[in-house]
Image (tube, rainbow, N blue to C red):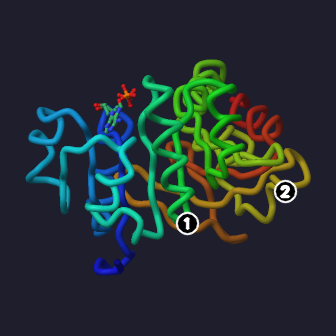
C-alpha cells in the first residue's frame, strides 16, 4: 500500500499524541489510516485524516480486515491502556510490518515494547520534560538533544560574536559550538557561512556537545 508520495502510515490510538502525529503527517502529504476504538474520537477526525476507522486494535481480525498488515509503517499511540498497547504492538510485529513505532509511558512499558520487537520506542512525556528543563534553566529559545550528548540550540548571539564575520570570532575553538543557521528579524533562517556577520537582534542556531551549547546560550 504505497499511494501517497511518502507512502502511507497507520496510526493506532488517536489520543493527544496520536492525533498530533497523524495531523502532522497529513500536513506533510502523507496518507494516514487512523484507528481508534472511541466513536467520538473517530468522528472528530474523519474529515481531516485520509481514512479514519473505529476498531479495536487488539483484535487481529479487525486489523487484517482494514489491511493494516499491508502497511510498512505503523505507530502505536496508545499509552494509558498498557494491555491494549502491548497486544496491538505484538500484532503489528507478527504481521511483519517493517517500521513499528510505539509510545511508552514508562521505562517498563518501553522495555516490553522493545522486547516484542518494536523498532522505535518513543517516550514523549519524558523527553519533552527533559527538553523543557533545558529551556527553563537557560536562555535558549529552543533545544533539541540528539544521541551521544549532541544538541542544537536556538538562541540570541552573545555580544562578543556580534558585528564580525564568524570566521573571525572563532566560535568553534572558543566555545566548542558551530553556528549552523542565522535569522534576521522578520526573515527566514539561512545557512551561516564563514563570512556571515551576526547582528545583536539576530536569532542563531548552534550545534555542539550538549554542555557546550548550553554554556554558549548562557553568555550575554
Ligand atoms: P494520549 O495521552 O496521547 O491522549 P491515550 O493513551 O490517553 O494517549 O489515548 C490513546 C487512544 O487510544 C484513545 O483515544 C483510546 O480510545 C485509543 N485506544 C485505546 N485502546 C484502544 C484499542 N484497543 N483499540 C483502538 N484504540 C484504542
Give the vertical position of 189 relative to 110 (above or below).
Answer: below
For this rendering, which residue is in front, 176 or 12? 12
At a point 68% along the width and 26% down the height, the residue shown is: 107
From the viewer's side, name the closer residue of 125 and 46. 46
Q: Dot 1 lies on which element?
A: loop
Q: Quadrant of residue 96?
A: bottom right
Q: Is residue 73 left or right of residue 214?
A: left
Query: Residue 84: x and y, percent?
Result: 43, 33
> Which quadrant, please, contains the C terminus?
top right
Q: Secondary structure at mark 2?
A: loop
Left/right of residue 66 with respect to residue 9 in the rendered view: left
Upstream in sequence: badge 1 or badge 2:
1
Q: Is residue 4 above or below residue 144?
A: below
Of the residues tagged 1 and 2, which is closer to the observer?
1
Residue at image point 35% right, 80% down:
2
The residue to which callout 1 is attached is: 96
Ligand 1: image quarter = top left
Circle 2 is placed at which residue position?
A: 170
Question: Horizontal and vertical percent for residue 204?
Answer: 58, 50
Asked whether, in this view, residue 41 is left or right of residue 173, the answer is left
Q: From the image, which quarter does the N terminus lie in?
A: bottom left
Crowd class of label 2 (few under 14; some 14 to 19; many from 20; radius 10 Å): some
Residue at position x 53%, y 44% in the image = 102
Tally of marks: 2
Based on the displayed image, in which of its 4 quarters is residue 129 positioned? top right
Image quadrant in which you'd find residue 31: bottom left
Q: Position of residue 58 (x, y in %)?
A: 39, 41
In the rendered image, the residue lying farthest to the right is 173
Q: CA distance from mark 1 to mark 2?
A: 51 Å
User: Label 1: how many residues lie within 10 Å, few (<14), some (14-19) or many (20+)?
Assistant: few
- Could you say where residue 101 lies in the image, as x and y percent from the top left? 53, 51
Amino acid at each position: 500500500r504505497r499511494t501517497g508520495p511518502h507512502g502511507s502510515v497507520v496510526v493506532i490510538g488517536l489520543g493527544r499524541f496520536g492525533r498530533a502525529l497523524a495531523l502532522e503527517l497529513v500536513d506533510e502529504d502523507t496518507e494516514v489510516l487512523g484507528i481508534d476504538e472511541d466513536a467520538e474520537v473517530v468522528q472528530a477526525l474523519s474529515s481531516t485524516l485520509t481514512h479514519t476507522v473505529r476498531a479495536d486494535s487488539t483484535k487481529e481480525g479487525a486489523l487484517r480486515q482494514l489491511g493494516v498488515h499491508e502497511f510498512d509503517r505503523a505507530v502505536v499511540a496508545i499509552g494509558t491502556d498498557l494491555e491494549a498497547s502491548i497486544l496491538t504492538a505484538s500484532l503489528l510485529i507478527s504481521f511483519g510490518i517493517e517500521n513499528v513505532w510505539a509510545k511508552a509511558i514508562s521505562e517498563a512499558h518501553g522495555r516490553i515494547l522493545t522486547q516484542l520487537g518494536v523498532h522505535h520506542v518513543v517516550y514523549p512525556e519524558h523527553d519533552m520534560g527533559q527538553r523543557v528543563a533545558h529551556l527553563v534553566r537557560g536562555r535558549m529559545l529552543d533545544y533539541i538533544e540528539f544521541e551521544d550528548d549532541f544538541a542544537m540550540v536556538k538562541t540570541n548571539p552573545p555580544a562578543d560574536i556580534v558585528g564580525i564575520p564568524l570566521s573571525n570570532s572563532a566560535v568553534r575553538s572558543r566555545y566548542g559550538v558551530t553556528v549552523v543557521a542565522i535569522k534576521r528579524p522578520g526573515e527566514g533562517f539561512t545557512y551561516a557561512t564563514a563570512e556571515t556577520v551576526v547582528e545583536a537582534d539576530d536569532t542563531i542556531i548552534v550545534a555542539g556537545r550538549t554542555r557546550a551549547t548550553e554554556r554558549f546560550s548562557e553568555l550575554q
